[in-house]
Amino acid sequence: MQVNIETPSALRRKVTIEVEQDEIKRELDHAYNELKRGVVLKGFRPGRAPRNLLERFFGDQVRGEVIQKLVREYTEKALEENSLKPIVAPEIVTEETDLNKSLKFSATFDLKPEITVKDYEGLKVPESTVEVKEEEVDKTLQALRERQGTLKKIDDRTEVKDGDYVLAAVEGFVDDKPLSTGKTEDRLLEVSKRALAHGLDEILIGAQAGQEKRGLRTYDPDYAQKDLAGKTVEWRVNVKEIYERVLPELDDEFAKDNGSADLADLRSKVREDLERHAREEADARVRQGLLELVIERNPIEVPESLVHREQHAMEEELASTLRAGGLAEGEIDQRLKAAADDLKQRAEKRARTALVVDALADQEKIEVSDEELGDRVARIVTEAGRMRDRAAEFYRQAENREGLRATMRREKALDLLLARAQRGEEGASS
């Protein structure tokens, strides 16, 4: 094996590897011997097929498998012998794949930068105050009532009003032709702008139960749902039944149903919960401020391949969100192109943050025990509700558990920054 190492930049390495002919021949002989034992060719007993016939029928397959095996093995060997540890899997480019001559390829990658984090002790942070107003407690209690509300059928009114719930069928037509995606069979719908898209709430308001109502809506050419964009749609709605949402009374009985002794106790618990969340949010803001200050004081070079990996992951997350929103692949590609510069900046920031926080965790010898990891996984799975089985399966994979361990380790490092910071007056900084 011949190895040549180039250094395009401080962190980037290009390792060119050429595998000698005798090593290639030895691997090819081994591959064909293994193939001979298992393959059956007409006219030959098992294990007796001649090499030339194996090469004729399986040559491309064998050469491909041998190249993959040699590239993998000799890349690992070259990296180990030269004490090189890529931060992201190397990019492999083959230069010569005629195995009768040689096998030559290159592995390009970035090294993890050596970072010593400085100036992170005793940073000053503002002493935040947490205040929960009565209006916030009232709003939370109202939301709790709404979640526990029930639907009551209205028998003494046939006209639909804003805020009603209706059992209705909805269908859209363009030039008297039904839209392929514009039909809704009998479903329970909340008549509100918040719950219904495309202006359907305005069509439903005023409709009479048992009678069809029609209404026209014209949509802009750049409307988000492409099958409606630039079209005038006639919506036809048929309301079968009308319901109103009935909320429970906010009294001691309601409080008891929600695990409290009385209404005063429930209000107290709600306030405590809101205060806890407010403190957590305040601490999160302080941690972020401390982190940004530490990063500013410790400028580092971020490996290009790490930024690319983070950007790719962010693009996949955005694409998945857009697909869930019903966008077509062409529209998704356009959105990704438009967001490319922003995603790259955010990816670089994410990569820089991870490197600095990991280096801090290394310096402080911060670790996450198997017991701590197991407790976190158990909590995540328990809180997953109906997705519990999927969450459990996800964390059975070793790589996913190690990813969570890395996240928890970074959380501990940020907790350490906060614990060692100096609390000061609101707005103080250092």
Image (tube, rainbow, N blue to C red):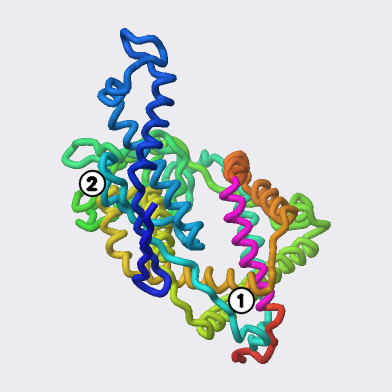
Q: Is residue 208 magenta?
A: no
Residue 277: percent from left, percent from top: 66, 68
Query: In the rendered image, which residue does mark 1 sit on?
Result: 287
Looking at the rendering, the stretch of residues picked out in magenta corresponds to 398-417
Local SS, label 1: helix
Quarter occupied by residue 128: bottom right
Residue neighbourhood size for the residue with mark 2, other residues' Cα within 10 Å, grouped as few (<14), some (14–19), many (≥20): many
Q: Nearer the viewer, residue 278 or 387?
A: 387
**Can you see residue 128?**
yes
Farthest residue, direction top:
43
* Three-letter code for the amino acid on which mark 1 is drawn: Arg
User: Residue at horizontal 34%, vertical 16%?
Assistant: 49
The one nearer the camera, 206 or 347, is 347
Q: Position of residue 266 (x, y in %)?
A: 76, 61
Mark 2: which secondary structure? strand
Name above or below for residue 85 compared with residue 329: below
> Residue 400: within the magenta?
yes
Amino acid type shown at disc 2: Val
The picture places residue 207, in percent across and down from the top left corner, at: 37, 44
Q: Nearer the viewer, residue 254 or 207?
A: 254
Q: Label the magenta part by its dominant secondary structure.
A: helix
Compared across the picture, whether 272 is left or right of 429 comes to right
Task: Indicate which label's residue lies in the foreground, 2 or 1.
Answer: 1
In the rendered image, which quarter is residue 39 located in? top left
Residue found 38% across the figure and 27% down from its top: 32
Q: Which residue is mark 2?
A: 233
